[in-house]
Amino acid sequence: MLLKKKNNELCYVGGISENRGIYELVESLKICKIPLNLAGNFEDKAFEIKCRKSEGWKFVNYYGYVSREKISEILNKSKIGIVTLHPLINYSDALPVKMFEYMHAGIPVIASDFPFWREIINNNGCGINVNPLSPEEIADAVLQLINDNDKMMQMGMSGKKAIFEKFNWEIEEKKLLKTYRLIIQQ
């Protein structure tokens, strides 16, 4: 679905915990006032209560755990995908599947400003990096994109193009086989 025909909505799909930046994301909603389609299970009841007490929660469409079909539906109705994980060693060098799912769906990504992630986002022109601990920065990035439909569409198309040209199993398979051949030759 074309971004222009979608409602101004964000999405986050995945496990919901404090270190995945969900509280800051919910807090950002009271600033930008843009609905968030939130899908996944809370890993901790106390954290869920904390999020629900935030003023930003009134902008959340919470789905809980959903099927792959429902994830696809959520991605198709959202204009921006969010992956603002906290700056922990486990995350800073990781490749979050959700970032690539958002890119594949043709929606721009707002992602944590980790060097590795910044390289992916900037080199492919598919989103904006932010300080994941700053609701203000997250809200600013959301509004920046929501208020510039052309930029949002370009970033979405660039992300989708990167998936087909760089970040897919066919490309990775070639790299893996090349590595195996080098190992075998030694």
Image: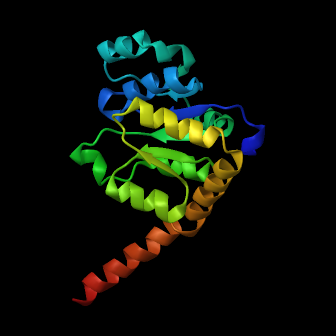
Q: Is residue 79 visible?
A: no
Asked if residue 56 lies left or right of residue 74, the reply is left
What residue is at 37 percent from the left and 49 percent from the top?
Answer: 113
Q: Give the x, y percent position of residue 167.
A: 50, 63
In this view, 160 is above or below 144? below
- Can you say which quadrant of the picture contains the N terminus? top right
Residue 46 location (% of width, % of height): 30, 13
Q: Is residue 94 visible?
A: yes
x, y percentage for residue 106?
64, 50
Residue 173 or residue 84, whichever sits in front: 84
Q: Residue at x 75, y 45 (%)?
A: 2
Check the image and report above or below for 43 versus 54.
Answer: below
Colour logic: rainbow
- Residue at left offset 59%, top offset 24%: 35
| Residue 84, quarter of picture | top left
Which quarter of the figure has residue 53?
top left
